[in-house]
Amino acid sequence: MAPTVLDRRQMLSALAAAVAAPATAQMARRPAPLRHDAVQSLIDAYVKDGRVPGAVVALVEPGAHKPVFLSAGVSTFGGSQKVTPDTLWRIYSMSKPITAWAVMQRVAAGELALDEPIAQHMPEFARMQVLIDPKAGLAARPASTPITVRHLLTHTAGFSYAISGNGPLEREYKRLGIQPGSVPGFLQPGEGALPDLQAMTAFLAGLPLALEPGTAWKYSVSLDVAGALLERVAEDTLDRVLDRQLFGPLGMTSTGFWARDAARLAGNYLWIDRKTGKPTTTPDPVMPLEKDGFTSRPRLLSGGGGLVSSARDYARFAQMVLNGGEFAGRRIVPAGTAQLALSNLLPPGVFHEERNGFAAGGRLTLFDTRAGASGGPALTYGWGGAASTLFLVDRVRQFAMVAMLQFMPYGRFPFEPDMGTALARDMDGR
């Protein structure tokens, strides 16, 4: 019997079919409908136990935008207004992924590149210095590596945060008003007034860096600098840039740097003594400290911690990320750029918390950590906010989650691990 001979075209077709078959089967096995009993029980318990007055969770799965909203409680302790998907929440550092994805849109447009020095657009950062001894003073040496766009998106630029201690550099941040977020009411006596965004970056350029760029992960104002970079590239203010690039196209009509409808803004509560820093057994409203924060346009448009949003709005952003840059049939971010934004962008040899990667503005798990208290599958992306809001995109179990509630400080109650446990109960094996 004559041997069978496959020509080149037949061989390539056979290989393509073999590769496509598992993918086709995976598509055919669409995940079962989202389960949410454990998540609903979790937020019910947080309300019942008096940890928060109310909470809203959004769950989305790939494809068409059909979110599942779960809610419990009211917007303020002692109040009667029930929380809804349209209640407004201070999302603080959950602003960071939004700013980072807006930067990635500019990367897709060819206006920025991940590994280009930001000094090409912000020349004041061309000759940065690095602290010799962060504990001893502000003595510094010239940096050997320029700050790049990648560094800003991954907290490896070498900046610090005013909340990261009370060393010489952090004290200078406080003196100059370089603070996280946009709320002047949080300033302590002796601290400088909040500058506008471009003035803040000018102050930063005149100070040493805490670390050599690209050598370590250090939580910092880098996403605020990324917002200033967007302003330079777009030649517009950050609020208008985000409106044009993301909030408008995604229909996020309630998201911005202040609440247009203050009556929808939920209460925020502090669970530590302001003088001693020790945990308390009763909550203290944060709102009196905020004064005009979150209810009028702030001077500092903080891309790292200044946004207000609703569960309905942020679920739209989460859907776009889960869908790889697409929302409601519209391409918001090119597919290749979205894949890049969800990849590990850390410089070689650098990790977040020793084992995680970092994608565009958010943590990226590199290993399956479901055996831990708050773990998840590999390649789970997300971040949280100082008032305990939480966002994640799980591409293995094929869902995204947005949790909106307000208590400070983050970690006063174990909401993140509690949510991880609840999601595992609902999503594993569905």
Image (cartoon, rainbow, N blue to C red):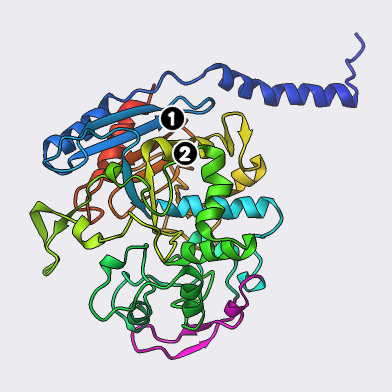
Indicate whether 98 appears above or below 57.
below
Neighbourhood count class around disc 2 (C-alpha, 10 Å): few under 14, some 14–19, many 20 upward = many
Q: Quadrant of the N terminus?
A: top right
- Distance, label 1 to label 2, CA atoms, is 8 Å
Q: Secondary structure at mark 2?
A: helix
User: Residue farthest to the top?
Assistant: 1
Q: Which residue is under mark 1?
A: 60
State the residue in front, 111 or 338: 111
**Which circle marks residue 414 in the picture?**
none
Q: Is residue 181 left or right of residue 291?
A: right
Q: Amino acid at mark 1?
A: Val
> Which quadrant would residue 301 be assigned to in this image?
bottom left
Dominant secondary-structure state across the stretch colored magenta = loop
Image-quadrant location for residue 299: bottom left
Residues 156 and 65: in front is 65
Q: Farthest bottom residue?
A: 139
Residue 6 lies, in percent from the top left, at 88, 20
- At 58% from the left and 77% from the top, the residue drawn is 125
Above or below 124: residue 354: above
Name the side, left or right, on which 335 lies relative to 428.
right
Residue at x-position 24% and y-position 53%:
411
Secondary element at tag 1? strand
The location of residue 66, given as percent across then percent down, is 46, 24
Q: Are marks 1 and 2 in contact (CB under 8 Å)?
A: yes
Extent of the magenta region: 121-145
Q: For label 1, count other residues whose C-alpha is less than 10 Å away and answer few (under 14), some (14-19) or many (20+).
A: many
Please give the residue where the numbered disc 2 appears in the rendered image. Answer: 318
Q: Is residue 309 visible?
A: yes
As shown in the figure, which amino acid type bears the numbered disc 2?
Answer: Ala
Front-most of residues 372 and 155: 155
